Amino acid sequence: MSYYLSVGEAHRRITEYLNRFSDAVQSQDGRSLKSLLSVSSPHLVSLADALLIFQDWGRLIKNSQQLNDVLQHHLRALHSFRTGRFIDAYNAYERSANAFLLEFRNWESAWAMEAVYAIAYEIRVLAERADRELASLGKTPEKLKGAGSFLMKVFSALTGKGPKRVGALYVTCQLFKVYFKLGTVHLCRSVIRSIETARFFDFEEFPKRDQVTYMYYTGRLEVYNENFLVADQKLTYALKNCNPRSEANIRMILKYLIPVKLSVGILPATSLLQQYNLVEYINVVQALKSGDLRLLRHALQEHEDRFLRSGVYLVLEKLELQVYQRLLKKIYIIQKTKDPSKAHQIKLEVLVKALKWLEKDMDVDEVECIVAILIYKNLIKGYFAHKSKVVVLSKHDPFPKLSGKPVNS
Amino acid sequence: MDGGGGSRNQGRSSRFRGPGNPSRSSRSDLRPSLPGTSDRRRPPSAVAENPTVEDRGGPFIGTCPDMCPAKERAQRERLRDLSAFERLNGNPGKTSSSLAVKKFCRTISASEMAVADIRPLPVLQDTLRYLFRLLETSGYQFEMVHDFVFDRMRSIRQDLSLQHIVNDQAIQMYEEMVKFHIIANHKLPKNSDKSLHHLNMEQLTKCLISLYDMYAINRKSNSINKNEAEFYSFYVLLHLGSNSQGDSLSLWFRKLAYPIVTSNEMCFARSLLRYFRLGNYKRFFSTAATEVSFLQLCLIEPFLNELRALAISYINYSCYKLHSYPVAHLSVILMMKETETESLCEACGLEICIDEDGNRFLPTKQTGFSLPRGFQNYSFQGFDRFEREVCSFDLAI
C-alpha cells in the first residue's frame, strides 16, 4: 500500500497523529492515548506506512510537544515494527515506555491507566517477537527478561496507596505471563506477596478480568506445589468469574482444576471432558473409577509429554493411591456377594493376584507396604496382620471418601 | 552463597589476592606486593608485557603454563600459605610447580587479572587429573584431601568460565567434577561437621546448573550430549524429598527437552521418585539395593533414613495390635542390620520387645512415634555391591 502514499498524505497522517496524541494528553483521555501507544495493533499501520514515506518525521515533533521523548521513541518503534525489525522495535519501545513511566509517576491521578495497560501488554508481546528474532540470529534471547524488569518498575509505580493501585493486578498478570514463559516462576513470589498482603486495597476492587487471570496463575502455582486446597479455591474462583462464553479460557482453567479435583476425590463427568476437549483425562478418571492401575499407567504414558509440559504429571501420578483404594474396594464388594460374613477380611495373596492380572508384579511384602500406606493415610479403615497376611477392614465406613480434602500426608 | 567455602578454615579464607583479607590484612608490610594490588597500580607501560584480561577486551586464552601461576606460588611461599599437599619435602615455605595448585579466589575483576595467571584448557585438564590422582594416592584422610580438591576445583571452574570455555572438553571436566562431589557426599564422614556436607552439596548443585547451561549451549538441533540424560537425572535424585519450596520438580520437568525426560536414565530416576513420593518403601529399597549405580546410590543416600522412619511409622500405625512386627523382617525390608533397625525404632520413640527365644519385635500401635530430627549413621546393604567404588575414586578425564 505504501507505494501509493504521497509525501503530502504521509505528512498529513503524521501530524494528525501528533495532534491526536497532544489532545489525548491535554484532555487526559486515557482511552485514546491507549490506542495511540500500541504498536502491534492494526489501526496504526497507516501511520507506520506514512513514517516509511516521510522519513524526516523527527522534525515534526516539536520540542514543546508534551511527552516528546515518548513520541520520538514510539514512532521509531512503529517504524521498525512495520519493517519487521523487532529487536530494534523493542529497544525503541522500551525507551518510549521508560519515558512514559517517568511522566506517569508524577501524575497524581490515574487517568492514564489504560495507556499503562497498553504499554504493559505491548512491551511483553514485542519482547517475545524480538526474542524470536534474536534466536533466529543465533543470539541469546534477552528481551523478555528486559520486559520483565520494566514491568517490575511499572508494578512498583502502581503499588502505592493512591488511585493507581487499581492497575497493579493487570501488570502482575503480565509479569506472570513473562515469568511462566521464561521459566523463572519463583520471581512471582514477591509480586504475589505484595498483592496479597496489601491491607488498604481490597482484592475485589481490582477489575474482574484481572482477578480471574491472577487466580488462574496463582492457582497453577499452587498445583505445582501440590497445595490442593488453595489451588482448588483459586482455580474455582477463576472458573466461576471468567467470561462464560470464552471456551478457550474455561478449558485453560479446567486443565489445572481437574487434576486438583481428582486429588481431592472429585471426579468430573465424561461429558465435561469431551465438551472442553480435555480427553487426555478420560482414562485417568476411568482408572480411578475402576481401580485399574494398568489403565492409570497407560493413560499417564500416552499423554506423558502433555502432562509434563503443563506440569500436572506428578500430581496425576500421586492418584495411584486412590486407585489402590478403589481396587481394594472392588475386591471387598466381590467378596461380599460371595460370603458377606468374611468380606471384611482380604488376603494379601488375593491382592497380589489381582495386581498380577493388572500386569503389576508385586510380592506380598510390597502389597503389605501399600496397605500400610492406605491405612496410614486414611484411605482404608482397618489394620493388617503381618503373620496371617490379611487386611481386616473396619465394619463401619471401611473406605472413607476424600470428599474435597486431599490425601493425608 | 558463592564462596561459602571461604569461611571454612584458615587455609581457604586467606585469599592471596583480596585487598581486605582479614587474615592477612594486619601484615600491612606485605600488602604492596600482593599481585592484585600491584596490578592495579601498574604503570601504563607495563600493559604490553603483562596484559590483563581487561586489556584483551574480548575472548582470550590464558598463558599460565603451570597448575599454579609462578607469582602466586612465590607469594604463598613467602606467606607460608601452602597446603600439606603443596609442600616440597614437607617444608611449609617451599613448593614447586608440580605441587602447587592455584587457589580459588572469589573477587577478581578483569583489571586485576593478568592473562599470565589464567591457565589454558590443556593445563586445566592436567590440573584436574592431578587432583583426581591425589584423591587416590595421597594417603591422607578423605576429609583433608576433599578440602584441598574442593577449593582447587573451584579455581579450575573459575578459569574455565573466565575464558568462556564451554566445549566438549569443558563439559567432560564438569561431569567429572560433579561425580567427585556426588561420591564425596558419601565418603565424607557422616557424623562430622554438617557444614562439610552442606558446602559439598552446594558446589554439587552449582556445578550441575553450570553443566546444564553448557549442554544447552552445545545442543545441536535435536541431539543431546551422550551423558546429558544421566546428569539431568541426578537432579531428580537430589530433590527426591523436595517439599514445596517454590521451584518444584513439576516446574523443572516443564523445561526439560523431551528426549531427556524420556531417556532410560531419567525414567529410572522418575520411578525412584514415584516410589519415594508414594511412600512405597518396599520397592524403593529393593530397587535402590539392586538396580542403581554407585553415583545414584550416593545421591539418594541422604533420603534413606527419612523413608525408613516413615516406613516404621506406617507399620506402627497400620499393623494389628496383637501381632507385633518382627524386627528381623523389618530389617530385611529396610535393608539394614537388625541392631540398627532396633536403634532406629528407638530413635523414633518406639519400644522394642524380646520374646523367650530372643527374637525382637516392634509392638505396634505405639503412640510415642516422632520423626527424629537427625539420624545416626546406619548402613545400607545396597552399598555392598560397590565395594570397589567405595574404596576408590573412579574418575577420569
Image: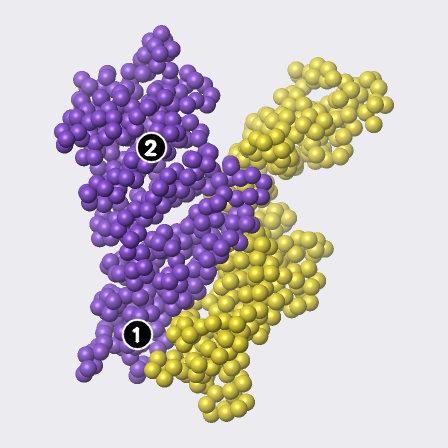
- Which quarter of the rendering shows the N terminus of chain B? top left
Using the rendered image of the protein, determine whether residue A235 is visible from the camera's viewpoint.
no
Q: Residue at x 43, y 17 (%)?
A: B56
Using the rendered image of the protein, determine whether residue B125 is visible from the camera's viewpoint.
yes
Q: Residue at x 27, y 30 (%)?
A: B101
Q: Quadrant of residue B147?
A: top left
Q: Which residue is mark 1?
A: B329
Q: Residue furthest right?
A: A4
Q: Residue at x 49, y 79 (%)?
A: A353
Answer left or right for B58 relative to B143: right
Q: Which chain is purple?
A: B
- Foreground: A18 or B324? B324
Q: Residues within 10 Å of mark 2 (few under 14, many from 20)?
A: some
Q: Amino acid at mark 2?
A: Asp
Q: Residue furthest top?
A: B45
Q: Which residue is mark 2?
A: B126
Q: Which chain is yellow?
A: A
- Foreground: A52 or B206? B206
Q: Residue at x 30, y 52 (%)?
A: B389
In the displayed structure, A343 sits above or below B18; it is: below
The image's colour scheme reads by chain
In the displayed structure, B117 sits above or below B255; it is: above
In the displayed structure, A169 sits above or below A6; it is: below
Q: Chain of mark 1?
A: B
Q: Earlier in the sequence, mark 1 or mark 2?
A: 2
